[in-house]
Amino acid sequence: MTHRSGYVGEEQWLRAKGLLFYTLVPMGFSFGDCGFLSIGWKKVKLTLALISGPIVGLQVRRTDKVGTEAAFHPVEEYMRWVDYWFRIQQYIHDRDSVASPPPPHHTPRKIPKRVFVATDDPSVITELRSKYPTYQIYSNEEAAKTAQLGQRYSDVSLMGVLADIRLLGKCDYLVCTFSSQVCRIGYELMQVNAGDKAEAFHSLDDIYYFGGQFGEHGS
């Protein structure tokens, strides 16, 4: 966007430009300024340290969502796109290795396949670890337990969903359902954390939209 002089004053233009940036590029948020949230954030930072390197974020919403606002999607449907992404990363790595030959007797490096899972159904985590033993599966299991309908509106559950959003925003790629606001916010935070990551996702249902844009009430 360029400034077309003669249409608005310089001061008005700068204000409009700042507002446009604020609207289109969501600001990151800090747990340290949120009282009790800062305690839980220490655990989240530990998880972030453990999942360094290429990682895909999965956000699997089940419980009250399925059958009302969204369809059921099996874990295999999510992992299909995870597998595609890691195959591409391995291809890029191997291609670059050919361009810069490694030293003799060098063992080709296999990219570790890491997945962070955010879900409101703890059985999803168990199922993924059972069916995909070659993947390193990370999760906030406490958040998954407190996201059950009986505890969903507790302070602990709030901390869990905020932590999941923060962790999703740190991932390199997301596979989820954009009918869920949790994944959409995680996707927005990716743009803050890593710049332009507009294409770093695959949604199993909706396109990206902001809450209330089409009258939906997803969460």
Image: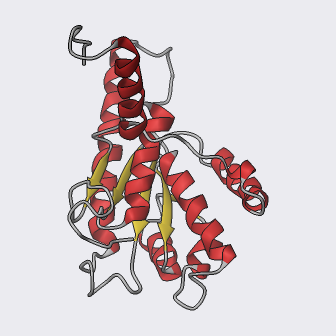
Please tell me in which quadrant of the rendered image residue 26 appears: top left
Image quarter in which the N terminus is found: top left
- Depth check: give the residue in front, 11 or 197: 11
Q: Is residue 101 visible?
A: yes
Q: How many marks?
A: 0
- Look at 23% across and 69% down and name the residue there: 215
Q: Is residue 110 above or below residue 11?
A: below
State left or right for residue 26 relative to residue 139: left
Q: Residue 165, percent across and down?
A: 52, 57
Which colour assignment does the render follow? Answer: secondary structure
Front residue of 121/98: it is 121
Q: Is residue 46 left or right of residue 204?
A: right
At x 58%, y 81%, the residue is 153
Is 160 or 91 nearer to us in this picture? 160
Residue at 50% x, 36% y is 193
Residue 120: x percent and y percent?
Answer: 49, 77
Q: Left or right: where does residue 139 sit relative to residue 213? A: right
Does residue 109 appear in the picture of this structure? no
On the rendered image, what quadrant is the C terminus found in?
bottom left
Image location (x, y in percent) of residue 218: 33, 71
Q: Residue furthest top?
A: 5
Is 193 on the left or on the right of 21, as rendered? Answer: right
Question: Which residue is outermost to the bottom?
Answer: 150
Q: Which image quadrant is residue 21 in?
A: top left
Instruction: Identify the residue shown where x is 21% and y is 65%.
Output: 205
For residue 169, above or below residue 207: above
